[in-house]
Image (cartoon, coloured by chain):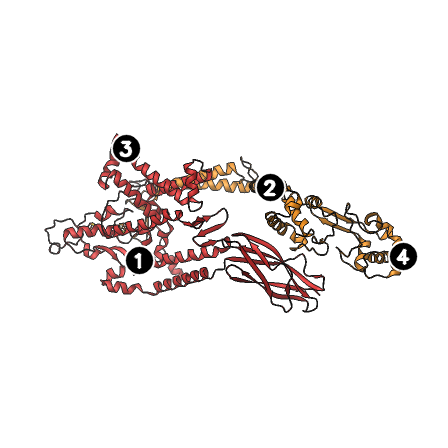
Chain colours: A orange, B red
Amino acid sequence: MSDFTSDFWPYFISAIVIGGIVFCLTLLLATSKSHDPAHTGESTGHVYDEDIIEMNNPMPRWWMWMFIITCVFGAIYLFLFPGLGTYTGKLGWTALKQYEQEVKETNDRIAPIYAKFTSMSGEEVAQDPKAMAIGERLFMNNCSQCHGSDAHGSRGFPNLTDTDWLHGGAHETIKETITNGRNGMMPPMAAAVGGPEDVKNVAHYVLSLSNSEHEASRAALGKEKFVACAACHGPDGKGNQAIGAPNLTDDTWLHGAGEAAIIHRINNGLNNKMPAQGSRLTPEQIHVLAAYVWRFSNAK
Amino acid sequence: MSTQKSTSKKTIPIVNDPAQPVTRSLYEPHQKIYPRNISGLYKNWRWVMIWITQIVFYGVPWLQWGERQAVLLDIGTHRFYIFGLVLYPQDLIYLVVILIIAALALFLFTAVAGRLWCGFACPQSVYTKIFLWVERQVEGDRAARLRLDASKLTRNKLLKKMLKHSIWISFSVWTGFTFLGYFAPIRDLMQSILQLHLSPWETFWICFYGFATYGNAGFLREQICKHMCPYARFQSAMFDNDTLIVTYDEERGEPRSGRSRKVDAKQSGLGDCIDCNFCVQVCPTGIDIRNGLQYECISCGLCVDACNSIMDKMEYPRGLIRFSTQNALTHHWSQEQVVKKVLRPRVLIYTGLLLLMSAGLVYSLVTRVPFKVDVIRDRGVMSRIVAGGKVENVYQMQITNASEQVETFKISVSGIEGLSLASAKEFTVNAAESRMVAVSLQIADGSIKSGSHPVIFEIVANGSNERLFEKSIFYMSR
Ligand code: SF4
Ligand code: SF4
């Protein structure tokens, strides 16, 4: 345990814990007998206001034993479990281990359900209503935060229901995307393209690719400069799923359409990241989830 | 003034007599109590209550309701089945209300008639009573038991003790098994026992509850009431001078003394108590009611039965020990006056609250909608423009079907003119499951001003036609 900011605190806590138990036991034993030389049977010998006498109403002895048993239990507990400063306990228990244990138990319990789906192809899984119910839950809990509950995405977060895929829309590819994540990287291209005017021209050329509103003269000028971009997006601007370069000829604009947005992208580049889920979800879960996502763009 | 007062403050003198130092333990060993058997009205009532409570306790887990156990508190899946009712963690409020009703009922009964619960319905007393009955069948009544415990260990004594303990233990195990039957299907449990493959946890809990029954009813008995039960400690806050309690009529009874039946007590100046100690011998908590109201008294009324039987024998009027109130004793009230005093403000307030809470509970259970809906706006996207120049908002809707049938829910939305539901309008949710679905709303761009607008989802269960309304916000972008 390294949660302590100073070496003093572990000792401080241990001293209080052990001291507390020792104190309880000492107190219990010290007070178990009355040494007051009392006269009358049940009086403790304390008299107040002449006639108010403190009586001894003894606790049952088994109650005292319970107290002692509690102290012994406390000692055993502190020996087995972490509770004394930096001492980790004989059993080596930690909250993290318990959590992992519980996750494992749950996974083991639901493994048979997933086992059936794992042996099926993605397309088959997508036809199975039970699997899709599971997929829906997985998606809502793990993916909807970025891609939206209806999977339509938003600016910077791809829409999963169109047929446009950055890295490919096959079941296997989606699985790969979910497991390892994706890193969409576009370097700043302004220098490679030329001056601000050239950037603007390229932007208009890009707009022309998808038949968006553009100035034809600028587009014509930009076409030459586009060679810098072609390395990734291809000479015809159709993109490259192998490296996640978007297709520029359709009207899907992940980071916003229009001249200004495109110019900004050329100048500053982009870094878009889909986090890997492989450590959070099991391969079996990802198999089902990928089928659920695949189904969005591959009608029922 | 105040300074004068403080100077007059007395110190506590410690009486010191070195001639006779006494050392005493402040923890006393347990004194076993050997209550004597008695017959009479209250004893009979106790048995009636024992039968009722035990038939309910041992019987209920065996009842079936359709395909399932009628009463099952399934901790693992977080569902409580109580006949037709299925409660979920979200229904915790019912549990809270039921506990409040139980507490109010306890206040009310205590204010009116003292510790009726303790003497007649509390599991601790009831099981003690059952165990005592077994003890008496095996070992005999008080005198015989005292003799047996004092005697040396003989074959006969060993046999009797073994018989008693084996009956106690079998009964305890059955109790532990039944108790667990409220939390795990009891028929399956029975199967597992018969086939000897009870899981470790099941074994543990059966043994645990069985051991608790054995220890509490066989050994601790009145010790629980006297030293551990919190109710015994705070009952004084609910008692007043008009509360019915078991009382000894001191005026009538004193001076107590033994006498022959031929003696005329009036003439010789004696009270009605013949000092036979019968009332002390029958008391399960081992107290002498003639010392007045004590917190140990569990209001079981056995001393009333005992003393009445003596009074009958002596041909004195009954009721030297009786259920009465402190006021009635001091003011010599008649029965009617006591009854009249029952309707005092404290009792009326308790009754009013109790009725109010019960009515509320019944009302909310009757009008309970067997499903739940939660709507959360998607935060990742405030609003978006979609094909057709419409503005769209997306919501995550969690529908929990709390009924035991598959149910289809129809969704509609209102709150803004022209707003329409763009996603599916019906969702099917399996029995006792919950499902999260995406719902999207659309409106023509520019038809409302930018900012947030309240909207209301209406969710109707097709089967039962019950409906719920859930509020949310539609966000219109600039
Ligand atoms: S004093 Fe009487 S009523 Fe009270 S516990 Fe004893 S026998 Fe029962
Ligand atoms: S049973 Fe009645 S008569 Fe006997 S000692 Fe008790 S109060 Fe007196």
Amino acid on which the number 1 mark rests in the picture: Ala
The dot on residue B69 is: none
Residue beneath disc 1: B113
Q: Amino acid at mark 2?
A: Lys
| Circle 3 chain | B
The residue where tag 4 is placed is A221
Q: CA distance from mark 1 to mark 4?
A: 101 Å
- Residue B317 versus residue B327: which sits nearer the camera? B317
- Whether residue A70 sits left or right of residue A222 in the image: it is left
The amino acid at mark 4 is Leu
| Nearer to us in this view, A285 or A123 | A123
Q: Nearer the viewer, mark 3 or mark 1?
A: 3
Residues at marks 2 and 4 on the same chain: yes
Does any portion of residue A151 appear in the rendered image? Answer: yes
Mark 2 to mark 4: distance in Å? 58 Å
Q: Does the beta carbon at disc 4 come under 8 Å from ligand 1?
A: no
Q: Nearer the viewer, mark 2 or mark 4?
A: 2
State the CA–CA distance, disc 2 to disc 1: 64 Å
Q: Nearer the viewer, residue B32 or B318?
A: B318
Q: Residue A151's spot in the image, x, y percent?
A: 67, 54
Q: Say the numbered circle drawn on residue B159.
A: 3
Question: Do marks 2 and 1 share a subunit?
Answer: no
SS category of the residue bearing label 4: helix
Q: Looking at the picture, how far across and down is residue B374, in whole percent? A: 57, 58
Q: Chain of mark 4?
A: A
Which of the two marks, 1 or 4, is nearer to us in this view? 4
Residue labelled with disc 2 = A116
User: Is residue B466 depicted above or below A241 in this figure?
Assistant: below
